[in-house]
């Protein structure tokens, strides 16, 4: 992979860098919408949000720490390039999300805004990461591996994990919080399932 140019079916380093900045911005903004509405999502990001609410810890730090065990799996199964790219993506996400949380203030009239807008932003950001050979760690790594190896949709893998997260959440939060969070997470995963397909996207990371 070259700095400024690459074969037609590959991304250059500059293209990857620009995509990571855009993707990080979108996902971090999505997290801000969810946090403002007091909602969460699925996957590792959702788990990190739940723990940050319960323990009062910074989301970015919890998100980074939860992802650490998955890098071993990523290195063994997905290769070092994917692992390094995903590690960079997680560091960017952890840092930018904390910066946005400290500098952006939103006033949402209803949790639906947080659920829908937050999920759209996060979903588009995740698609950008996926299409440039990276993920935000955790279940995203597992989802991409299963899709590449067994053609099992990435969005479906995430839905299965999300089910476990939300079952636990029903015992920790008010029903309306869980319901709006569930709707947002379902929308996000449907967005990914419909748009992330190898046969519709030629360029690789």
Image (cartoon, helix red, strand yellow):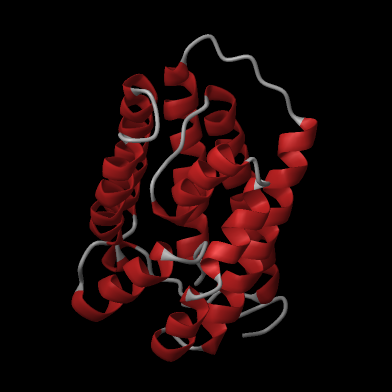
In the rendered view, does 79 fall on the left or right side of 87?
left
Rendered residue at 52%/46% (across/down): 51
Residue 15 appears in the picture as rendered: no
Rendered view: 169 above or below 77? above
Rendered view: 90 above or below 118? below
Residue 93 is situated, as x and y percent measured from the top left of the image, at 64, 55
Tell me where residue 92 sits by quadrant.
bottom right
In the rendered view, does 47 fall on the left or right side of 3?
left
The image quadrant where one finds the N terminus is: bottom right
Foreground of the two, 143 or 26? 143
Rendered view: 54 above or below 71? above
Rendered view: 120 above or below 196? above
Residue 96 is situated, as x and y percent measured from the top left of the image, at 72, 49
Foreground of the two, 4 or 123? 123
In the rendered view, does 169 fall on the left or right side of 65?
left
Rendered residue at 60%/65% (across/down): 65
In the rendered view, does 173 fall on the left or right side of 117?
left
Total marks shown come to: 0
Residue 202 appears in the picture as rendered: yes
Rendered residue at 58%/56% (across/down): 63
Rendered residue at 66%/70% (across/down): 88
Foreground of the two, 13 or 159? 159
């Amino acid at each position: 992979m070259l700095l400024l140019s690459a074969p037609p079916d590959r991304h250059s380093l500059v293209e990857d860098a620009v995509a990571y900045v855009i993707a990080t911005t979108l996902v971090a903004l999505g997290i801000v919408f969810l946090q403002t509405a007091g909602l969460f999502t699925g996957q590792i990001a959702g788990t990190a949000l739940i723990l940050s609410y319960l323990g009062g810890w910074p989301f970015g730090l919890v998100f980074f720490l939860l992802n650490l065990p998955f890098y071993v799996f990523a290195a063994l199964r997905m290769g070092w390039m994917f692992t390094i790219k995903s590690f960079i993506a997680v560091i960017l996400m952890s840092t930018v999300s904390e910066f946005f949380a400290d500098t952006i203030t939103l006033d949402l009239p209803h949790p639906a805004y947080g659920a829908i807008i937050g999920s759209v932003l996060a979903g588009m950001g995740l698609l950008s990461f996926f299409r440039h050979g990276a993920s935000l760690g955790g279940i995203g790594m597992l989802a991409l591996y299963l899709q590449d190896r067994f053609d099992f949709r990435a969005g479906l893998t995430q839905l299965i994990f999300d089910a476990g997260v939300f079952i636990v959440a029903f015992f920790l939060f008010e029903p309306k919080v869980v319901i709006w969070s569930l709707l947002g997470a379902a929308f996000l995963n449907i967005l990914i399932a419909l748009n992330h397909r190898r046969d519709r996207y030629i360029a690789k990371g």
